[in-house]
Structures are given as C-alpha cells and as structure tokens.
Amino acid sequence: MAFGGFNQGDARPLQSEINMVPLIDVMLVLLIVFMITAPLLTHSVKIDLPQASSQPNQEKPETVSLALDADGRLFWNNEALDEAALPARLAAAAAQTPQPELHLRADRNTRYQTLAEVMSKARAAGIEKMGFITQPETEAARP
C-alpha cells in the first residue's frame, strides 16, 4: 500500500540538507519573466509637446535693517528714526509684497526691554520674518 506513517519500514535516513533545485527553478522562471517584460516598460508614447518660453519670476524680498544703539535710538536702514514713527514704518513694510525681512542690529549695551518692545511692535505691525545681525567672534577675542 502507498499510504503509511512516518518512517514505517523505510530505511532511508532523514535528509538534513535544503533541496536547492526548486529554488533555482523559481529563480530562473522569474529571470525569464523579467527579461521579457523589462523591454516593454521602456516603451513610451511619442508626443510632440508644445514649446513655451517663460521664466519664473523670483522676486527676492528686500531687507530692512533696524539698528538700536546703546542709548535706545533707532536707525532705519542707517537713517535716524523717531520712536513715534516706528509703528508707521513697520506697518508700511508689512504691507509690501513680498514682505521684507527685518534685520535687527542692537548694540551690545542695549537694554533687553528696548529690544523686546521693538520686536513686539514689529510683530503687531504684521512683520513675519525677523532676524538678529551679529558679528562673528574673532579668535583674538576668545578667552
């Protein structure tokens, strides 16, 4: 009879190696399938596209330099500015398209309170981009 349990009368020892022949057969079949389908993927439909000549308009926003000295005086692009005129200048700058970047330059001895008030006025006027301008530390100045 062809049916039987495990190792009933079979004198063959158990096989402890992996049979690689079926794996190689599957690999060769896949290789043939890919070799046939790969050239089909590179074909494309030839279309004569219209030509257009246009350049993207990339406007770089201007930068506004607002300097504060140790005495609390303000300078708008190196021009002296009265503190009462600052909100109007900031609002005018915020209304521009594209909006300019505000670069804050403060003296080393400027009070933080004064700088915080200027930043608050700029944010209230609608200025989105602000940055601090500093000078890099030189090797001789390092302790």
Image: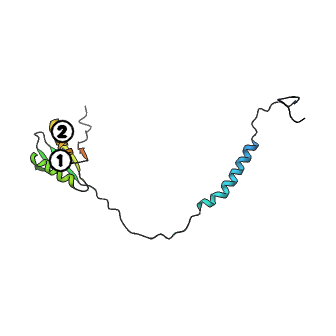
Residue 109 seen in this snapshot: no
Which of the 4 quarters of the picture holds residue 83? top left
Asked whether, in this view, residue 39 is left or right of residue 67, the answer is right
Amino acid type of the residue tagged 1 in the rendering: Leu
- Residue matched to label 1: 66
In this view, the mark in front (2 or 1): 2
Q: Position of residue 94 (x, y in %)?
A: 21, 52
Asked whether, in this view, residue 101 is left or right of residue 113, the answer is right
Which of the 4 quarters of the picture holds residue 130? top left
- Identified at 24% across, 44% down, the residue is 131
Which of the 4 quarters of the picture holds residue 2? top right
Q: Position of residue 77 (x, y in %)?
A: 16, 51
- Identified at 22% across, 47% down, the residue is 103
- Total marks shown come to 2
Mark 1 residue element = strand
Mark 2 residue element = helix
Q: Quadrant of the N terminus?
A: top right
Q: Position of residue 122 (x, y in %)?
A: 19, 45
* Along the line of sight, the residue nearer the viewer: 142 or 89: 89
- Residue matched to label 2: 116
